[in-house]
Image (cartoon, rainbow, N blue to C red):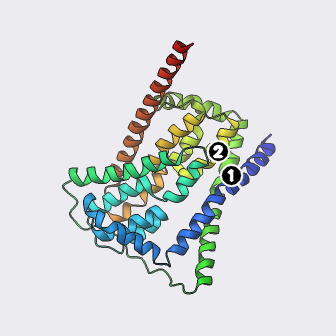
């Protein structure tokens, strides 16, 4: 039975990697190439005047743009080139915790059927709201942030070299995804066949119910929470096919996950900068719980009202 489970898991992992790779490759290629054009500097200069509204200097637009268009590692590289206080870095970290890698992760979330406007509204809205609140509430953090300087990126000249670099970066991104997704899908398939997932879902049922989701959404939920949206999307796509996870539950799960995912990596990555990472984690977690419970409550209430109206009309 295990051999059959591994075969099914490998096939599922390859299909999922192919599906997600079709999003990752073009986005990564385009954004990587744009770094060597005037486009990204133009966007940064356009955003810079708005930074003061959220308590950041103009050049803080650099890590924000890099983080949203690329990932947290690119954003930290940008942070380390600037003179920023602990409070300013904390604001940037909080914003990017909600809205990093916006293009790819939003594209992957859409693969599960979640509407783009829902993803962007939640992620960008939480990023801006958190920045405003932290700027107004926190009076400390005036000391300079710590960090280890990193070397300059190698200069690449010529259209061919830039395109080749972009292709390599895109393929590397897909490769990194495959390394995680394929073994993960194999593990998920084995746990399904051994009925472990059924027991796991029952254990999580009370918490899932509080968040307004059914137990069969537990596996993609936990995957996204621990490993990130990209890997959570892969498991959720498979769960939607095999476990009949409803569109409603997928949307609610992703509302939670866009606010709080990859909690280990996305939190630990900011430790070298000297900011308080525990509040960073707790704010994300509490925000995700409250937001998800509120959305689920409103959604369920609306459904009940519509059902009653339908009964009255009959």
| Residue furthest out toward the bottom | 157
**Location of residue 184 in the rendering, given as x and y in whole percent from the top left corner:** 65, 49
Residue position marked by numbered label 1 in the rendering: 16
| Residue furthest out toward the left | 139
Q: Residue at x 25, y 68 (%)?
A: 144
Where, by quadrant of the figure, is residue 114 drawn? top right
Direction from residue 40 to residue 107 in the image, left or right: right
Q: Residue at x 38, y 37 (%)?
A: 290
**Location of residue 227 in the rendering, given as x and y in whole percent from the top left corner:** 54, 51
Q: Is residue 247 above or below residue 146?
A: above
Direction from residue 166 to residue 46 in the image, left or right: left
Residue 67 shows up from this direction: yes
Direction from residue 211 to residue 82 in the image, left or right: left
Residue position marked by numbered label 2 in the rendering: 237
| Residue furthest out toward the front | 313
Where, by quadrant of the figure, is residue 63 drawn? bottom left
């Amino acid at each position: 039975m295990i051999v059959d489970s591994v075969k099914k898991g490998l096939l599922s992992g390859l299909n999922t990697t192919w599906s997600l790779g079709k999003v990752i490759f073009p986005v990564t290629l385009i954004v990587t190439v744009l770094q060597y054009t005037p486009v990204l500097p133009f966007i940064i200069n356009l955003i810079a005047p708005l930074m003061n509204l959220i308590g950041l200097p103009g050049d803080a637009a650099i890590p924000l743009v890099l983080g949203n268009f690329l990932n947290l590692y690119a954003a930290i590289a940008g942070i380390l080139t600037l003179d920023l206080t602990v409070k300013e870095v904390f604001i940037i970290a909080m914003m990017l915790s909600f809205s990093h890698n916006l293009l790819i992760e939003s594209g992957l979330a859409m693969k599960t059927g979640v509407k783009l406007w829902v993803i962007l509204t939640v992620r960008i809205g939480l990023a801006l709201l958190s920045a405003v609140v932290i700027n107004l509430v926190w009076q400390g953090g005036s000391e300079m942030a710590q960090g280890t300087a990193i070397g300059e990126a190698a200069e690449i000249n010529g259209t061919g070299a830039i395109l080749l670099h972009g292709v390599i970066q895109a393929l590397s991104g897909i490769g990194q995804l495959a390394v995680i997704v394929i073994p993960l899908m194999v593990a998920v398939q084995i746990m399904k066949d051994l009925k472990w997932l059924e027991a796991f879902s029952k254990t999580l049922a009370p918490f899932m119910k509080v968040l307004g989701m059914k137990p069969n959404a537990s596996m993609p939920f936990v995957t996204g929470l621990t490993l990130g949206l990209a890997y959570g999307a892969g498991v959720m796509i498979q769960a939607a096919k095999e476990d009949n996870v409803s569109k409603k539950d997928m949307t609610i799960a992703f509302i939670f996950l866009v606010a709080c995912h990859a909690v280990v990596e996305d939190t630990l990555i900011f430790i070298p900068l000297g900011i308080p990472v525990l509040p960073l984690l707790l704010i994300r977690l509490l925000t995700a719980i409250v937001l998800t419970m509120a959305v689920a409550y409103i959604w369920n209430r609306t459904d009940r009202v519509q059902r009653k109206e339908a009964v009255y009309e009959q």
